[in-house]
Amino acid sequence: MDLELVKKEVSGLVGPGTPGLAAAVYSGGEPLVTAAAGTACLEFGVPIDADTRFDIASASKQFTAACVLLLARDGKLDLDDDVRTHIPELNLAVPVTLRQCLQHTGGLPEWYAVLPLTGHPLSEMTEERLLEVIARLRTTTFEPGTDFTYSNTGYVLAAVTVRRVSGRSLAEFARERLFAPLGMDDTVFRDDASAPLARLAYGYANHGGPPVRADTQESAVGDGGLVTSVRDLAPWFGFLADGRVLGADLRDALLERAVLADGTTLPYAMGLYHHEVAGRRAFGHAGGMHGYLSDLLFLPDDGLGLAVLSNQLQIDPLALNERLVRLLLGAPPEPGQEPGALPLPGHEHWHDPVSDATLEVRAGDDGLEVADVGTFVPGADGRWHGLGDAHLAWLEFSGDTLVVGSLLAARRPVTFVAAPPPDGTPMPDGEWESDELGVRASVRDGVLRIGRTLELPVTPAPAGLWRAEPFTLRLEGGALLVSGGGLRRLRFT
């Protein structure tokens, strides 16, 4: 195993004076090698090293889940408790269990989609303020336990539950019960985004131009918000290997896959998802938020852990971790998809009858152009594979059906059906109200306004719908139904 290959691979990705990344390979709870490149703070030219701390965004979920599992082991709660038992101010009309919160099977609307409808600014969002928004929600996007939809809302409720049950914030509980026993002194849930943190890399957005600051804004944690370094993560990978310090029972509970009511077993467990990398069994979780991307990965058969943490948005941590695995284990590079001769789809316009999402697919010079998604080219497996920002997606056509899949194990394929094209009819003017969210919506002269601040142009969409990016709008029996970004037909009357 040539560990110098890791340093070489990472050092060639970015140069000095640009945002960068840190990476590490672990075995037995120790870092075998660390590598870093780029700058933690462009303003002062501070280089990234193995002790630079990053916001790891959704990769934080495994740590939140571990805290809930510790309380379950203590007998303070049960994973099958209705979350309303611990947070009675929730207005959910049906029971959603803590297990469903942690495994994304509760149908909880995505709070990142709800927030712009309410007009609450993300930069001022605390756990208390966010709970006030979430507590108003009554309807789930599907019957809990019957489907999977990734939702950060369940993990915010998990953090609130930890506070209510233990009497300590998630940050305090995690420090005492997870990080201190493991010796992870530089790892913390950052539940006050205004507080300075030593050696924290600033986040930067760097798509298509010079990098601009894009730091974490909200102080609500649980779904994200963990700050750590590649050096400080080493003991966690030791725990993932064999349950050391915290207990093998806790480790095994984290890896328990979700099972739907119909018996379907999902790849998602508790803040971790099972998949394969270079033909090896693996589990882990990626994260992305504002100016940060991350991926934590463990290969149980090889006893190897890998972490990539970055403060920019142009390097894909998942793809980098896969390349590093192949380098370390001597596996051949992933075979590319040889171009195949595929017929063009017979329809341009498509509609997902479950989520109301729509797609417009047209033949382009380089393949299929999917509006607002990207370019797809034919592959030898009979599917169209995405390029650029769409590289993790694939399309498969069969007559009047389009299946949209992902190379990420946690995302289930979505089936679209052929739909009538937009008929050009503008959306009628009107006013509606959601007593669930306590906000009003109006359409006037082709502009949708919701809440205090949201204004979006409305255009006709396939299947007799309208689009106000990132939302899809439907009129049904006089009601306005809003879908998109983790919402399914939120009703305004």
Image (cartoon, grey):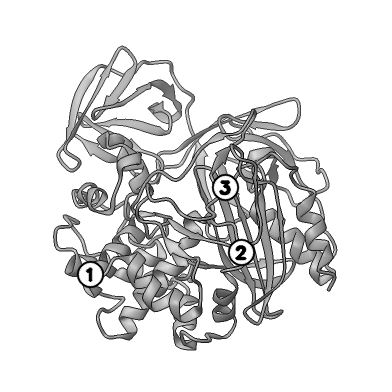
Q: Nearer the viewer, mark 2 or mark 1?
A: 2
Give the image location of residue 69, x and y in percent: 37, 77
Ranked by sequence position, the earlier of labels 2 and 1 is: 1
- Of tags 3 and 2, the one toward the viewer is 2
Q: Residue at label 1?
A: 82
The residue to which callout 3 is attached is: 403
> Could you classify mark 2 by the number of other residues whose Cα lies within 10 Å: few (under 14), some (14-19), or many (20 or more)?
many
The residue sitting at 70% across, 34% down in the picture is 344
- CA separation, marks 2 and 1? 36 Å
Are the residues at dot 3 and dot 2 in contact (C-beta closer than 8 Å)?
Answer: no
- Is residue 387 placed above or below 380 in the rendered structure? above
Left-right relation of 358 to 1: left
The N terminus, quarter of image? bottom right
Q: Earlier in the sequence, mark 3 or mark 2?
A: 2
Locate residue 127, reporting x and y percent: 28, 54
How far apart marks 1 and 3 lie (CA) works out to 34 Å
What is the quadrant of residue 480 in the picture?
top left
What amino acid is found at the position of numbered circle 3 in the picture? Answer: Val
For the residues labelled 3 and 2, the Cα–Cα distance comes to 38 Å
